[in-house]
Amino acid sequence: MKPAESIDKINADLPKAPPFSLRRIFKGASIYAFGEVLVGASGFFLIPLYTRVLTPEDYGIMGYLQVFLQIATVIVAFGFHGAQTRYYYENVTDENAVGRFLFTINLVPLAAGFLLILPLSVAGYYGTWTFGSSNIPFSPFMILTLWTVILQVIANNATNYYKAKQNFFVAAILQVTRFLSITGFSLLFVLGYDMGALGRVSGLFVGMALFLVFSFSVYARNFVWKPSLGALKYAAAFGAPIVIHLLSSTIHTAIDRVMLERYVSLADLGIYTLSMTVGHALGMFVSSFNQAFQPGYFQLMSSNRKDKELQIIRTFKLFLIIMTAISSIGIILGGPFLKVFAGPRFEATIWVFPWVILSVFMGSFYFFFVSPVFFFKKTKFLPLITGLSAVVNVFLNLLLIPEWGITGAAVATVISHVVQSLSSLWVGNSIYSMQWPYGLMAIAISIVCLSLYFTM
């Protein structure tokens, strides 16, 4: 089936969408970015406070636990947030169907909590389990992390629902509330009770729990409290390839910390974790832009407009110019900034941070290139894209970490992100051919790479 025929078929199944608007995308991106930055502020804006109280070893524990949090969240969520967006657009006029779908997908994390995590928590509490080569206690660190997973999955479903509806105000309110709750309790436990890494883990759990009470009370108003087997099958069919994709993506972005924990000290792992935290402030912008762009992309591709490719390329060019400017400035000024911002105990972050910025920049192309995969429901290709980049990342980490330590892990991340973007370009264009501005892309990459070269 040709792309044009596929679009016509999808158009027949979808309710009429409002017109594509570049202004709406940037409005959404700015609001999403505001919310995302505030959520990430518990790990970014408060860094000067945390680095004066927490040790590099504390950051090492937090970074190691973050890997388990991310992987478990992907498994429990099972890609249902993506299915939620698609199902909403296919059934936007059927409130009963949407309500039953929302109720059904939120039963899954609850079941996972009571059937899997509860018995594991009891066994871990009464046992003397440890994990990692550093023998981190399972109780309370891992127990709190696993229960945070359940809370986070449901909370993410709530926030993503309003993003799918392009209800920017409600989505931003939920993000701000999440930030205030998590940050407030983290400060209480870390600064007020001097609990170290455990205070940060406890703050995340308690803050997420309080946020869920607020967000769920708003989100659940859209429920029809009756489970639907059909909705569950739809979500599972849509989510299965996505969960493999997201799991591969998580391994791609987080497995380096597991490997580092075996080869370097907890202090070095903490340096690397802090570098990733600061560097991914740029990742927040990329994620926010993508979340604003995707609904607009779906609307545009579902319309009968003749200038679809022109609108997509215009959006991409503007995004690329902004990313190039931010990345170059961040690489050049990041070192002097971090010396003051992170404090003397974490000064070594200045050697890793530029590589982290470069990796985020190189990976940002992926979100545009992969869009046809989601629109045309070709999600079976996602595991190939992220699986390949994950394999490359693991191989390079095994090769580079023993010799170069945390710098080797950062270089491996850059190369694997290049592989991810190139593979998504190939797959995306095979589904829906686009004439991307390769000349402008080459210039942008050269500028960012030169910025890195002159800071070395």
Image: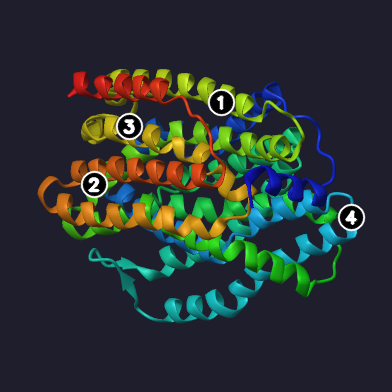
User: What residue would you read off at disc 4?
Assistant: 94
Query: Of callouts 4 and 2, which one flags the residue occurring earlier in the amino acid sequence?
Result: 4
Q: Which of marks 4 and 1 is in front?
A: 1
Q: What element carries label 3?
A: helix
Q: Is mark 2 on a helix, strand or loop?
A: helix
The amino acid type of the residue labelled 4 equals Asp
Query: Of callouts 1 and 3, which one flags the residue occurring earlier in the amino acid sequence?
Result: 1
The answer, for residue 194, to whether it is visible in the render is yes
The amino acid type of the residue labelled 3 equals Leu
User: What residue would you read off at disc 1?
Assistant: 313
Q: Which of marks 4 and 2 is in front?
A: 4
Query: Of callouts 4 and 1, which one flags the residue occurring earlier in the amino acid sequence?
Result: 4
User: What residue would you read off at disc 3?
Assistant: 358
Q: How crowded is mark 4: few (under 14 residues within 10 Å), some or many (20 or more)?
A: few
User: What residue would you read off at disc 2?
Assistant: 409
Query: Of callouts 3 and 4, which one flags the residue occurring earlier in the amino acid sequence?
Result: 4
Gap between marks 3 and 4, in whole Å? 45 Å
Q: Is mark 4 on a helix, strand or loop?
A: loop
